[in-house]
Image: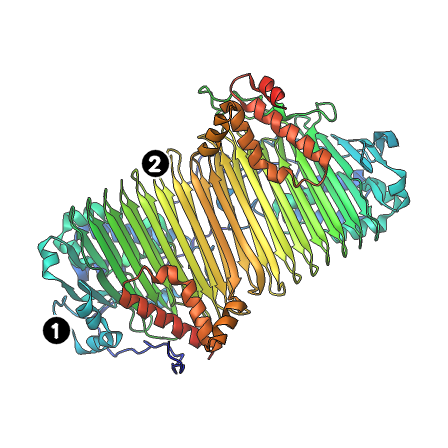
């Protein structure tokens, strides 16, 4: 991309002897995956028995993948860092199961309307309760839907809004082997959530997957996504897995700790389309183990008077590169997005969100909070765009960080691009600070030990975001995860005892 | 407040230019020979020629920036890189050539000097033609002269600090400036000396396709204090002019520097400026920066807080009208403990103009106890105008306290309605709201400048209705 333009004074543009070849090393934006080629695409498509149009879609994606830079947005190129990803040895799951191992209604967690549990390349469970099924709700794997209703699948894929300029999104679009489809017809308001559980982390393996969600007019869906290590029993808490791998404090920094030899890659999408006056809430709790690298894309297209909620919690994985694209197309549509990051060891959370206001009187409310321990880093990048037709927009973006270690690093790039002056509000706000000594002193003066006071303040910083997770169970589970991660990250052992006593 | 609206032409007020016979000028375009010729005309020491050539080499290999405004229209081959309007520096206003004097008189510089200012360094194209520092300042050792003259008279001081803040390799236009620089101000304030009144310099571009590459070096010794003001106006031309300046400020321990700019280049000028200061222990640096003119301005006054307890402040305002892009902002780089910075940015976009805030706030490891704040507000006055905000906040120290706020909005109809109900026309009411919005800047200016600036804003606003 960076081509040296010759100077003025034609002909004076001499060769550039100053630019010497660098010794080989991994640059921050270098990505090495061995399976991203056309022959793999063709093999995957053939193995899945796909029709030509679907192969065509994959081929278009792999063609786009090649020349694209990892970060296409010039605003963000200084803050890309894939160096902790070691994916050269990672092999793609080229075929994934289409049919569930278990499909009994008894698999459905209490209070939920359905479940999909994906364990590596298997479909561990797939079940939808009778009421939802009777209302016309579809919950299936992509392969399952293709067999049943190929036209619907084709429509869903055609409406996808995966960003064309995103290399990693195109990688998933080219080579996805697993997929989940959720369709809620017009007028169906599903009160209870559908649970989507990903259990991944087999060393040296990559799973690429797409989740397609369509919610019709006046319809409602709540989706709870749990991302956990596959070597833990379902439902167990992995919070300790990440922090436990690194000795904290006492002069034993995590820097220099070699990345695990065999990492695991997850490339996933959640592509949501909302009709008129629809309501979708997605809560995601990412708690993979430290050997995980994830490239995540979430894209929402919001129709008139519809509302999309994202509540995204990032706790696990060594490297998370996540992007959310919200398109507020319909008049009166809105998006509410809350993200929290709780980092430790040498985790890097690279989170970007694009919110594009296109309809009239649309609302965007985006809030990110990061607590960073050890050598962890958070890059919080958000761009609000208000296009010409978007009169009456109200848009807010907040990015807040709390650094709890000298080696932690927080980068916030909250940006605005405003083409339409007639707006109710267009603002962003950002802050970074340590634990407030005043608050600490106050709590200690009330007899709370310093250790516990710190925990209260840190978890209290995240709590306003936790409280916006749409499902009470998911909220509690997230609180447990945060609690466990905090405890595991503490230098001395009394953590668990005290934490239990406080709880 | 006058009740009868003044009838003011929306033509650029200072858009006149004089026929001047240039005594020396280089051929259009930039070659190694051009750089050597500039140095030869100036009779510079070898090290400066070497420096220019090093910068020229870097300029050739350095890519054009692609992240900011549209630079595609600049034709670097059509630009005259050096032009010398008169042979020697003048000390008295009476000796300045008539043509040049007329231009400056229409800009009101002598009056400003008589009334208020302690010194005038007025740059007409590439050389300082008029220079006067009051005797008492000279007596206490304050140096205020053209940069070329500074190189001749204070070679050691000059060499010690020159290009230490902005090296030629910093960016493409800093490299260009370093290769062909001419003119600008050289200021040295000795230890403990407080300069009571602002030092002032005017820069103008005259003659079609003149590049202006002034280079300003300000050294403020320990415990000293100075306020430097520059104001710019330039005649209208149809082809594109380029202004690529470099300003370096060194604030030694305990000193205080304020640098105020009112930039009102005509709307065909590309204004690509690198302004940077080093603030040593306990020093304070303030950039007060207004951009109303030019076709494209890319300017991000920066402060590197190098010493413990240093303080940085940037107040920046921009007005982008028809065909204009103001890509401005500020940078505060915290490198030492207990340093503080405050950035306030205000922009107004109208008639399809575009304003961009692009800023950077960095806190390096080891810079403990930093307190920093950034505030950006933008007003969009009409359909078709645009505002972008791109702040970068990179914090690598855990006890940093940083806050950032940004808003974009339109002029409140309630405020307009209220003012109109008090008898103001809509035009006057809007003007008043905009002036109020920019007041955070205006109130930092000496009175004469505040009046002039408000007049400029008013002209801009009335132009918008024409």
Q: Give the residue at x 18% y 55%.
A: B195
Q: Which residue is mark 1?
A: B95
Give the total of numbered labels. 2
Where is residue B317, by image quadrant? bottom left
Quick check: B142 left or right of B83? left
Coloured how? rainbow
Query: In this picture, is B56 found above or below A490?
Result: below
Q: Residue at x 38, y 49 (%)?
A: B342
Between residue B453 and residue A415, name the one nearer to us. Answer: B453
- Tell me, yes or no, whether dots 1 and 2 are on the same chain: yes
- Along the line of sight, the residue nearer the viewer: A267 or A102: A102
Residue neighbourhood size for the residue with mark 1, other residues' Cα within 10 Å, grouped as few (<14), some (14–19), many (≥20): few
Report x, y in % for residue B445.
30, 62
Checking the image for residue B28, the label placed there is none
Toward the viewer: A78 or A221?
A: A221
Q: Which residue is mark 2?
A: B337
Above or below, comparing residue A380 to residue A460 in the picture: below
**Of pointers 1 and 2, the one earlier in the residue sequence:** 1
Residue B4 in the image: above or below residue B85: below
* Front label number (1 vs 2): 2
Q: Chain letter for mark 1, please.
A: B
Tell me where residue A357 appears, x and y as whole percent.
63, 58
Using a 10 Å C-alpha cutoff, classify the residue at mark 2 as few (fewer than 14 neighbours), some (14 to 19) or many (20 or more).
many
Spatial CA distance of label 1 from label 2 is 51 Å
Helix, strand or loop for disc 1: helix
User: Residue A450: in sight, yes or no?
Assistant: yes
Residue A314 in the image: x percent, y percent? 62, 35
Quadrant of residue B397 in the image?
A: top left
Q: Chain of mark 2?
A: B
Question: Is residue A255 visible from the viewing direction of this image?
Answer: no
């Amino acid at each position: 991309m960076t081509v040296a333009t010759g100077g003025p004074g034609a002909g004076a543009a001499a060769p550039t002897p100053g630019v010497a070849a660098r010794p080989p090393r991994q640059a921050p934006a270098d990505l090495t995956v061995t399976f991203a080629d056309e022959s793999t695409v063709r093999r995957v498509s053939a193995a899945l028995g796909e029709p030509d149009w679907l192969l065509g879609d994959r081929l278009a994606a792999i063609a786009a993948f090649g020349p694209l830079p990892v970060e296409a947005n010039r605003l963000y190129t200084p803050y890309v860092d894939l160096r902790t990803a070691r994916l050269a040895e990672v092999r793609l799951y080229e075929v994934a199961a289409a049919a569930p191992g278990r499909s009994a209604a008894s698999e459905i967690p209490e209070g939920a309307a359905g479940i999909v549990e994906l364990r590596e390349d298997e479909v561990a469970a797939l079940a939808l309760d009778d009421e939802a099924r009777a209302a016309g709700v579809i919950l299936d794997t992509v392969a399952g839907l293709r067999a049943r209703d190929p036209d619907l699948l084709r429509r869903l894929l055609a409406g996808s809004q995966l960003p064309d300029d995103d290399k990693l999104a195109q990688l998933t679009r080219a080579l996805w082997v697993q997929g989940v489809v959720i369709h809620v017809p017009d007028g169906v308001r599903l009160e209870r959530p559908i649970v989507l559980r990903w259990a991944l982390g087999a060393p040296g393996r990559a799973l690429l997957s797409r989740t397609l969600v369509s919610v019709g007019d006046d319809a409602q869906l709540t989706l709870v996504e749990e991302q956990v290590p596959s070597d833990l029993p379902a439902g167990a808490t992995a919070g300790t897995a990440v922090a436990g791998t690194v000795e904290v404090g006492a002069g034993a920094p995590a820097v220099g700790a070699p990345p695990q030899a065999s990492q695991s890659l997850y490339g996933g999408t959640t592509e949501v389309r909302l009709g008129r006056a629809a309501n979708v809430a997605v809560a995601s709790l990412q708690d993979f183990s430290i050997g995980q690298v994830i490239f995540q894309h979430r894209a929402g297209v919001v129709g008139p008077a519809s509302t999309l909620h994202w509540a995204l919690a990032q706790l696990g994985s060594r490297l998370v590169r996540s992007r959310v694209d919200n398109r507020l197309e319909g008049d009166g549509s809105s998006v509410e997005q809350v993200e929290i990051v709780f980092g430790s060891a040498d985790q890097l959370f690279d989170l970007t969100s694009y919110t594009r206001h296109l309809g009239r009187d649309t609302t965007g409310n985006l809030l990110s909070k990061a607590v960073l321990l050890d050598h962890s880093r958070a890059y919080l990048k958000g761009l609000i765009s208000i296009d010409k037709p978007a009169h009456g927009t109200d848009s807010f973006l907040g990015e807040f960080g709390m650094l709890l270690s000298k080696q932690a690093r927080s980068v916030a790039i909250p940006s605005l691009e405003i083409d339409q002056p007639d707006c109710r509000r267009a603002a962003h706000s950002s802050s970074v600070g340590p634990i407030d000594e005043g608050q600490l002193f106050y709590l200690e003066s009330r007899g709370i030990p310093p250790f516990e006071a710190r925990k209260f303040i840190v978890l209290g910083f995240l709590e306003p975001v936790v409280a916006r997770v749409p499902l009470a169970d998911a909220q509690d589970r997230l609180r447990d995860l945060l609690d466990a991660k905090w405890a595991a990250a503490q230098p001395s052992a009394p953590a668990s005892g005290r934490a239990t006593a406080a709880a | 407040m006058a009740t009868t609206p003044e009838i003011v032409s929306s033509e650029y007020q200072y858009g006149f230019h004089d026929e001047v016979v240039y005594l020396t000028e280089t051929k259009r375009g930039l070659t190694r020979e051009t750089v050597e010729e500039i140095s030869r005309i100036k009779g510079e020491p070898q090290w400066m020629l070497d420096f220019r050539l090093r910068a020229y080499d870097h300029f050739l290999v350095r890519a054009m920036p692609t992240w900011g405004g549209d630079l595609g229209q600049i034709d670097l081959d059509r630009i005259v890189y050096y032009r010398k309007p008169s042979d020697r520096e003048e000390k008295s206003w009476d000796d300045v050539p008539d043509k040049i004097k007329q231009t400056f008189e229409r800009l009101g510089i002598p009056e400003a000097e008589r009334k208020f200012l302690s010194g005038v360094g007025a740059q007409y194209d590439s050389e300082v033609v008029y220079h006067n520092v009051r005797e008492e300042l000279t007596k206490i050792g304050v140096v205020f002269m053209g940069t070329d003259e500074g190189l001749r008279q204070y070679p050691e001081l000059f060499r010690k600090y020159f290009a230490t803040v902005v090296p030629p390799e910093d960016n493409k236009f800093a490299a260009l400036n370093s290769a062909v620089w001419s003119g600008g101000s050289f200021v040295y304030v000795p230890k403990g000396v407080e300069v009571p009144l602002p030092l002032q310099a005017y820069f103008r571009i005259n003659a079609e396709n003149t590049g202006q590459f002034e280079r300003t070096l300000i050294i403020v010794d320990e415990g000293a204090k100075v306020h430097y003001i520059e104001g710019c106006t330039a005649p209208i031309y149809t082809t594109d002019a380029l202004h690529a300046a470099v300003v370096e400020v060194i604030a030694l321990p305990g000193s205080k520097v304020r640098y105020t700019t009112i930039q009102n280049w005509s709307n065909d000028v590309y204004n690509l400026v690198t302004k940077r200061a080093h603030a040593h222990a306990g020093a304070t640096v303030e950039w007060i920066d207004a951009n109303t003119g030019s076709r494209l301005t890319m300017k991000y006054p920066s402060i590197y807080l190098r010493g413990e307890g240093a303080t940085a402040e940037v107040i920046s305002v921009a007005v982008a009208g028809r065909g204009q892009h103001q890509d401005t902002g500020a940078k505060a780089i915290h490198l030492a403990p207990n340093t503080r910075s405050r950035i306030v940015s205000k922009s107004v976009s109208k008639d399809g103009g575009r304003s961009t805030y692009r800023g950077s706030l960095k806190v390096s490891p080891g810079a403990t106890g930093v307190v920093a704040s950034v505030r950006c507000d933008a007003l969009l006055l009409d359909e078709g105008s645009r505002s972008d905000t791109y702040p970068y906040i990179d914090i690598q120290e855990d006890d940093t306290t940083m806050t950032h706020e940004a808003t974009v909005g339109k002029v409140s109809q309630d405020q307009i309605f209220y003012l109109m109900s008090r008898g103001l026309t809509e035009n006057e009411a809007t003007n008043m709201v905009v002036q109020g919005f920019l007041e955070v800047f205006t109130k930092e200016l000496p009175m004469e400048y505040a009046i002039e600036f408000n007049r400029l804003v008013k002209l801009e606003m009335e132009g918008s209705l024409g």
